[in-house]
Image (spheres, helix red, strand yellow):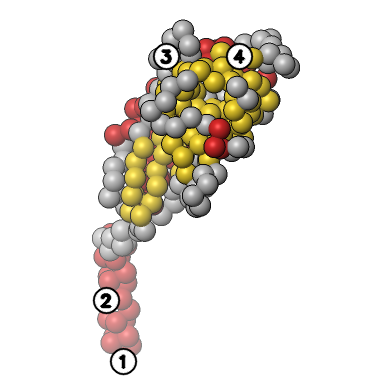
Amino acid sequence: MNRALLLCAALAALACSRTEANPVASATPAPSTSAPAPAAGPLTLARLVAANEKVKKGDPWNAARETLIRELGPPTREAGFTDWGVTTADSCALLRLESNGDVVGVVSPAVNYSRASDLENFEDCYYRQDRTPPDKNPSASGPVAGKTYSVHELRAGLEEARSKWASQKIRLRGRVRGVVRSGATKDSTLASMSVADEKNEAETVGVQVTHDVKSAPRDGQHPIIVAEGVVAKVGRSLDDARIVK
């Protein structure tokens, strides 16, 4: 009996020693589900443009978003879409992702818009980020009450210091290039006019006539008019206007 017990003990010890010498490999750990660490340092234009090709339409949404966070850092804005933007006083760029269910629906690649060479897209880039572009010349003056401005003068004023001109009531003189009427009744409630500078017809602004719309010229007529209205906050337009001459 004692010999049997000693034999069992010996066999058990031998099995333990073999297990310690050749341990069974543990199961492979599951890959981490945590998002990649965002890139260090401030977001730059070069990094933003370089990320244009990192994701594409149809990519899984979560994977695409994490890819750009790894490349660019946290989004600069999320409001039904996901934005990464870089703005300076003289340039603006924006990369935007929009989802379609669980995949990327739209990729709007980053393009660098310069105030000097593409003012309208530069300003639009700011507005798309729910921001107001800074004035080019903060010391520039706004409109003078009672003065009638040419189309060129209005455009130049907006380019130099939009904040001084936006929402101000002015009078504008120019040549009508086109008119589109709209409204639910036979009496139009809006006449949208394209008005050109008298000396340079390549320069135009919009004039939205909402008062005494019948006084606006018909399409095909190109008279010189004077309109009074409010300078729009966005774009190059005189809103809530009336024809005064």
What residue is shown with label 3? Answer: 201
**Crowding at mark 1 (Cα within 10 Å: few <14, some 14-19, many 20+):** few
What residue is shown with label 4? Answer: 149
Q: What amino acid is labelled 2 in the image? A: Leu
What residue is shown with label 1? Answer: 1
Q: Looking at the image, tell me whether mark 2 or mark 1 is earlier in sequence order.
A: 1
Helix, strand or loop for disc 2:
helix
Q: Residue at x 39, y 43 (%)?
A: 97
Helix, strand or loop for disc 4:
strand
Residue closer to the observer: 112 or 118 = 118
For the residues carrying marks 2 and 1, which lies nearer the camera in this image?
Answer: 2
Q: Residue at x 49, y 49 (%)?
A: 186
**Crowding at mark 3 (Cα within 10 Å: few <14, some 14-19, many 20+):** some
Q: What amino acid is labelled 1 in the image? A: Met
User: Mark 4 near mark 3, Cβ–Cβ under 8 Å?
Assistant: no
For the residues carrying marks 2 and 4, which lies nearer the camera in this image?
Answer: 4
